[in-house]
Image: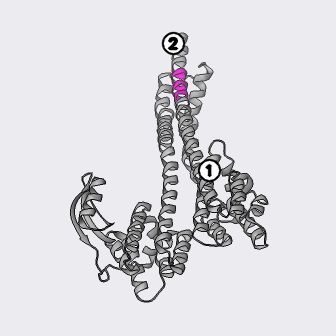
Amino acid sequence: MSVFRYKGVKNGKIVRSVVEAESVDEVRQKLRQEDIMVMEVAEVVGRGKSAIRPRSAMERKLSGFFISSGELENAIRQIVILLNGYIPVVEAFDIACDFSKGMLAQALNEVASEVRNGLSLAVAMRKHMPFLGNLSLGLIAVGEANGTLPEMFTHCRELLQQKRMIRNKLIQSMIYPVLVLLMGLGVGYYVTAVAIPKIAEVLDGETTQLPPVTQALLGTSDWVINNGIWILIVPFLMFFTVMILRRFSYGAIAVDYLLLRLPLFGKVFKFAANSLWNRNLSTLIDSGLTVVESLELTMNTMVNYCYRKQFKVVIGFIRDGKTLTCGMNSSALKKLSPMSMPLISAGEKSGSIDSGLKYVSEYYEDALNRRLDLISKLVEPALIVVIGGMVAFVYVGFFMGMAAVNSSL
């Protein structure tokens, strides 16, 4: 089967990529099924090195912030197609470079240059594409060693896709509540710092005879005017305090322990972590790595340090000759991810641990979706009640104050 590069139009946008097919007619048929209007199709042939400016040292450090997960997934998908079409690794990276842009194109070109000069692919990618992460880089090293690069690159793309989907779900579920909260705070600040002082002028500054609710309203306004800056400063101080604590092992464990026990949100972090580590460990074991190597790579991908600490415990037990089930039973992972235990135990007996872990990952991903739906349903009415309460407090305080002033005339 040959590899073809194409240029077409989909949803009014120009798209360029590669596809496997037996002929140009098959390419056009496949693209029509994807609603792509074909403009150009050509079979991929060998080519020379792309003339792209190498990145500076600073650009290499910042590349991970400027390369989107979607771009990276698409580039890896193209490399998989090219490798399956028996295109050499160097040429596959050169072609993927042509379809990429910015720092990703530069990184792919640098990797191709290093491999062309005799460096191994795994070392070159670890040097020039560290933003892929230790897990993906470890898979590529395994694929290069045992000749299964297409399969390992496919695993890399699946892991990146899984991570991106979970991250996007978390972000999307919080966008609306955060926007409503910010708008509420903005309205609250305007009312207390601007509107209420004008109301106080209408009340002729006479506050001793006013109802308690009106006095409380005016007192709140005075506090916001004098100390309102702390409403902005305190969240930033808390954020930087957490960041500083996470730079130390015990501080990081304590912070992450508290995150896992937050009301309502703690299970979000737990389900997200369980979904990721079960899928990652499943992929690594399926790739042919030993259990210890798989656990070490999985541990290094964990953001939560409570999980990292427990993985160290499990790894220690396995190195002492114990089974994975024994290690899990002796760590807090038994409580953090209870669904993993029976399937790991059954998998060790049947030799299919990876399949069981994949099912657990899907279970926790579904649990995460349900938890995010619950939060979105609870947060919206809660914010409406809070903001409505603020408005009611202002109106009641104002009108009761006006009534008290009129009755004293």
Percent x, y of residue 221: 55, 33
As drawn, the label of residue 271 is 1
Along the viewing direction, whichever of 282 and 221 lies nearer the viewer: 282
Q: Nearer the viewer, mark 2 or mark 1?
A: 1
Along the viewing direction, whichever of 381 and 386 lies nearer the viewer: 381
Instruction: Identify the residue shown where x is 72% and y is 55%.
Output: 341
Mark 1 closeness class: few <14, some 14–19, many ≥20 residues within 10 Å: many
Residue 242 lies within the magenta run: no
Left or right of 291? Residue 37 is left
Closer to the chain start, of discs 2 and 1, is 1
Percent x, y of residue 117: 41, 89
Percent x, y of residue 392: 53, 24
Percent x, y of residue 179: 47, 42
When asked about the image quadrant of residue 58, the answer is: bottom left
Instruction: Identify the residue shown where x is 76% and y is 66%.
Output: 323
Q: Mark 2 falls on what kind of element?
A: helix
Q: Give, as a three-letter code, the residue at label 1.
A: Phe
Mark 2 closeness class: few <14, some 14–19, many ≥20 residues within 10 Å: few
Left or right of 21? Residue 256 is right
When asked about the image quadrant of residue 295, the answer is: bottom right
What secondary structure prevails in the magenta region?
A: helix
Q: 183 above or below 322?
A: above
Tell me where the magenta segment starts and ends, as one range.
Answer: 388-398
Q: Give, as a three-letter code, the residue at label 2.
A: Asn
Along the viewing direction, whichever of 236 and 61 lies nearer the viewer: 61
Q: Which residue is mark 2?
A: 406
Instruction: Identify the residue shown where x is 53% and y is 38%.
Output: 376
**Which residue is situated farthest in the left direction here?**
39
When asked about the image quadrant of residue 26, the answer is: bottom left
Along the viewing direction, whichever of 236 and 339 lies nearer the viewer: 339
Left or right of 406? Residue 73 is left
Query: Could one spot residue 296 in this view of the protein?
Result: yes
